[in-house]
Image (cartoon, rainbow, N blue to C red):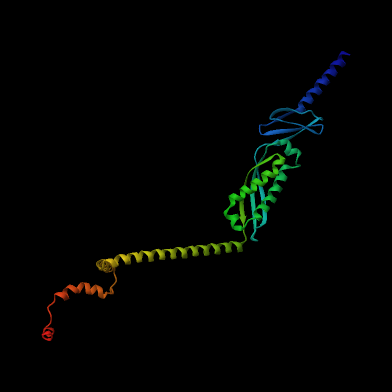
């Protein structure tokens, strides 16, 4: 009888050790365990050492680290009827492990499908120029919509980045022609503005020179000095009569009268 008691006690101890061995779970710092007892949600455990009774309790591990999900390229038709391919990357993490397990079957797949749909819907409301120029605003719009819809799943979407917007070759050439035409338009506007400013400056200079005729003569002599420094073999300069009159006027006034003129006067 004593031998049977020892065998029974030893068997019981062995069963308890086996039960304890299979009950021990170790969760890392970034992991949580969603424990179900007899099929019903019990509590969230972890991190560290966790005991789960086999056959009565089940535990599902949940990773709390930020997940980087690459959204597959989506065919998007913009508001101005331009077909483009857009892909993005979504950053999210689980903040409520119980909701992530209970409220949705597979939160990774659900978030991926929701990101694809949201990307098509949001970008389809904007024109191509807005997609290319206002990417930061579109990222914020997609992130806010995803965050609000995944809140019931215990998921926090921290960031969304649109990576590539692929265009057809014909559309790329059309955009290049548009950019070239825009640059030509700006060049013409700048040239016309320069002509306007130059005309205003010339008008102001002409008004200043008209007040002092001697300044015009000095400017004319300065121009002749600049032209004389060139290597041209022949230089033709117009000589205004007013300039000749101003130069020869004192000499003509000082010259003696001719004899024929004296006789006629007499």
View extreme (right): residue: 1
Q: Position of residue 55 (x, y in %)?
A: 82, 30
Q: Relative to 181, is 5 on the left or the right?
A: right
Above/below status of 125 relative to 98: below
- Residue at x 69%, y 41% (from the top left corner): 151
View extreme (top): residue: 2
Q: Position of residue 184 (x, y in %)?
A: 49, 65
Front position in the image: 152 or 178: 152
Q: Position of residue 10 (x, y in %)?
A: 82, 19
Q: Relative to 168, is 23 on the left or the right?
A: right
Above/below status of 129 relative to 16: below
Q: Quadrant of residue 25?
A: top right
Count of marks placed on residues: 0
Front position in the image: 80 or 166: 80
Above/below status of 28 relative to 137: above
Locate the C terminus by quadrant.
bottom left
Q: Relative to 120, is 216 on the left or the right?
A: left
- Residue at x 58%, y 55% (from the top left corner): 132
Above/below status of 57 relative to 230: above
- Residue at x 61%, y 49% (from the top left corner): 139
Q: Position of residue 87 (x, y in %)?
A: 64, 52
The reply to whether residue 192 is in sight is: yes
Q: Quadrant of residue 133?
A: bottom right
Q: Quadrant of residue 173?
A: bottom right
Q: Relative to 230, is 85 on the left or the right?
A: right
């Amino acid at each position: 009888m004593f031998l049977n008691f020892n065998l029974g006690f030893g068997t019981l101890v062995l069963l308890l050790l086996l039960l304890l061995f299979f009950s021990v779970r170790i969760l890392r710092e970034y992991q949580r365990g969603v424990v179900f007892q007899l099929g019903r949600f019990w509590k969230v455990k972890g991190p560290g050492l966790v005991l789960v009774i086999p056959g009565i309790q089940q535990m599902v591990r949940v990773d709390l680290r930020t997940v980087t999900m690459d959204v597959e390229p989506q065919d998007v038709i913009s508001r101005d009827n331009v077909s483009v391919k857009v892909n993005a990357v979504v950053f999210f993490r689980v903040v409520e492990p119980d909701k992530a397990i209970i409220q949705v079957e597979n939160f990774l797949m659900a978030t991926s499908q929701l990101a694809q749909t949201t990307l098509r819907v949001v970008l389809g409301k904007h024109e191509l120029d807005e997609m290319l120029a206002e990417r930061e605003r579109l990222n914020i719009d997609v992130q806010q919509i995803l965050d609000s819809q995944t809140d019931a799943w215990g998921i926090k979407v921290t960031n969304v980045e649109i990576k590539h917007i692929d265009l057809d070759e014909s559309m790329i050439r059309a955009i290049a022609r548009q950019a070239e035409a825009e640059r030509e338009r700006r060049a013409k506007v700048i040239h016309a503005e320069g002509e306007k400013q130059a005309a205003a400056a010339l008008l102001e200079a002409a008004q200043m020179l008209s007040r002092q005729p001697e300044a015009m003569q000095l400017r004319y002599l300065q121009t002749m000095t600049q032209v004389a420094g060139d290597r041209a073999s022949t230089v033709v300069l117009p000589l205004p009569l007013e300039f000749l009159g101003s130069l020869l006027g004192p000499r003509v006034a000082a010259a003696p009268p001719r004899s024929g003129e004296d006789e006629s006067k007499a």
